Image (spheres, rainbow, N blue to C red):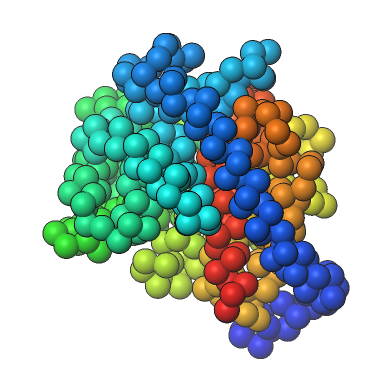
Amino acid sequence: MKPYLAIGLAIVALLSAGPIAWADAETDLKAKLPEMFAKSAAHYKALDAATTPLMKGKPVNTLENGDLYLPHGWLAWKGRAEYDMHSVYWWTAGHYPGTLWYLYEATDDAFFRERATVWTEILAPIAKVENDHDVGFMMNCSYGNARRLLKTDTYDALLLKTATSLSTRFHPRLGLIRAWGPMEDKSEFTVIPDTMMNLEILEVAAGLPGGEKRFDEIARSHADVTMKNHFRPDGGCYHVLDYDRETGHVKTIRRGQGASCETAWSRGESWGIYGYAMMYRFTKDARYLAFSRKLADFAMNHTNMPADGIPYWDYGRPGEERDSSAGAIMASGLLELSQWLGPAEGAPYRAFAVKQLLALSSPDYFSEGNEIGHFLLKHGTGFKPNKLEIDTPLNYGDYYYLEALLRFRKLAKK
Ligand code: GLY
C-alpha cells in the first residue's frame, strides 16, 4: 500500500471512531493505570499466599509428572472453588512467575521480585525439555523477564540451553518446529500458530553472548513457512496442521482448540498478531510487520468482533463465550504493532488496543475480591471443544493483560 494511502486510511479510521473519543479513551486508560496496577498487586499478593502452600502439595491435575506445581486457573468451571495447579512441565508454567515480574515492574514492590524469583527458579529443569515446543513460553516469560528486569546474566546459560533444546524440534526439510510429540515419531508432524510465541526465546538467545546464529535462522524459517500455510487468504488462522515430512505439504487440517477447520480460533489469531509483530522487533523484516497487520485487520474488522473488542472464543461462534485471554494477547500485540508502524499508520491499532484494555479493566472482566481466587480476568476460554476451561480465569490472560498495560504506560509517556 502506498504510504499516503495508508496514512489517509488511518486518518479516516480515526475520524470515524471520533478523534475526541479516541483521545478521551487514551486519557481514561492512562488515568486508570495506577488503580489497575494497585488492584492487580493486591489480588496477586492474596493469590500468592493461597497458592504457595500448594507448590509442593497434592496437585489438582494428577495427569502430569512434575513434582512442583504453579497456579494455572480456578476450578469454578468444574463446580469447585479451588486452584487449578499445574506442573512445571505445563505450557503455562512461566506465566505465573512472569505475572509476578510484571507486577514488580509495575509497582517496584520488592515483594514481587522475591516471589517472582522463587517461582521462576523452580522452572530450571525445563531448559532440558526436548519433547515440547512450549519451552519458549515457559522459560521466556519467567527467566526472560527476570533477566530483563534484574539486568543480570545469571540466567543466560538456562536461556541458551532452552533455545538449544527447542532447536532439536526443528525439521530442516520442512523448515518448521514441531509442536508436540517426539521427533522420532513419524506418524505426524503437528504445527500450530501458538508456536510463533515460542520463537521469542530463540531470538533472545541468538542475541546473548554465546548465542548461535542458527537460533535466529530457525525462528525466521518457522515464521516464513507458517506465514505461507497457516492462514487463509483473508488472514484467518487454522489451528493444527499436520505436515507430510517427505513432500512438505499439509496432510490434514484439524480444528484443534477452534470450533471448526473453516473458522478462526480467536486465541490462535491473537498469537499470530503478537508473534509476527515480535518477529519484526528482532529481524526488522517488513514482511512480518505487514503480516501482523493483516491478521490484526482480520480480527479488528471481523463482523463477529463484539463492540468492546474482546473476541468470542472463535470468530465463527458469535454469541457464545468470550475469551478474555485472546483479547489481552491481542491488545499487547496491537500495541507492539502500532509502535512499529509509527504514529499515523499505527493509530487505529493502538486505539483498538486501548478500547480492549478499558474493557478488560472494567467490572465486566476485571474481578472483584475473591470472586475467582484472586486471578484478574474473568471470562477466559481454554479449550471449549473438549469442554475444558470455559468462562474462567487463565493465568496467561492475566500475564498479557499486565504486559499490555505496561506497554501502554511506556507508549503514553512518550
Ligand atoms: N495451546 C495453547 C493455547 O491454548 O493457547
Rendered view: 41 above or below 295:
above
Residue at the image position 32 percent from the left and 47 percent from the top: 143
User: Which of the two residues, 316 or 392, is positioned nearer the viewer here?
Assistant: 392
Residue at the image position 25 percent from the left and 36 percent from the top: 124
Quadrant (top left/top right/bottom left/bottom right) for the N terminus: bottom right
Is residue 248 visible in the rendered image? The answer is: no
Instruction: State how many labels appear.
Output: 0
Residue at the image position 60 percent from the left and 24 percent from the top: 74
User: Which of the two residues, 232 or 387, is positioned nearer the viewer here?
Assistant: 387
Is residue 182 visible in the rendered image? The answer is: yes
Residue extending farthest front: 110
Rendered view: 6 above or below 324:
below
Image location of residue 45, percent across then percent down: 54, 37
User: Which of the two residues, 408 or 49, is positioned nearer the viewer here?
Assistant: 49
Residue extending farthest left: 210
To which quarter of the image does residue 356 belong?
bottom right
Image location of residue 130, percent across then percent down: 24, 34
Image location of residue 12, percent across then percent down: 79, 78
Residue extending farthest bottom: 4
Quadrant (top left/top right/bottom left/bottom right) for the C terminus: bottom right
User: Which of the two residues, 259 or 278, is positioned nearer the viewer here?
Assistant: 278
Image location of residue 62, percent across then percent down: 42, 11
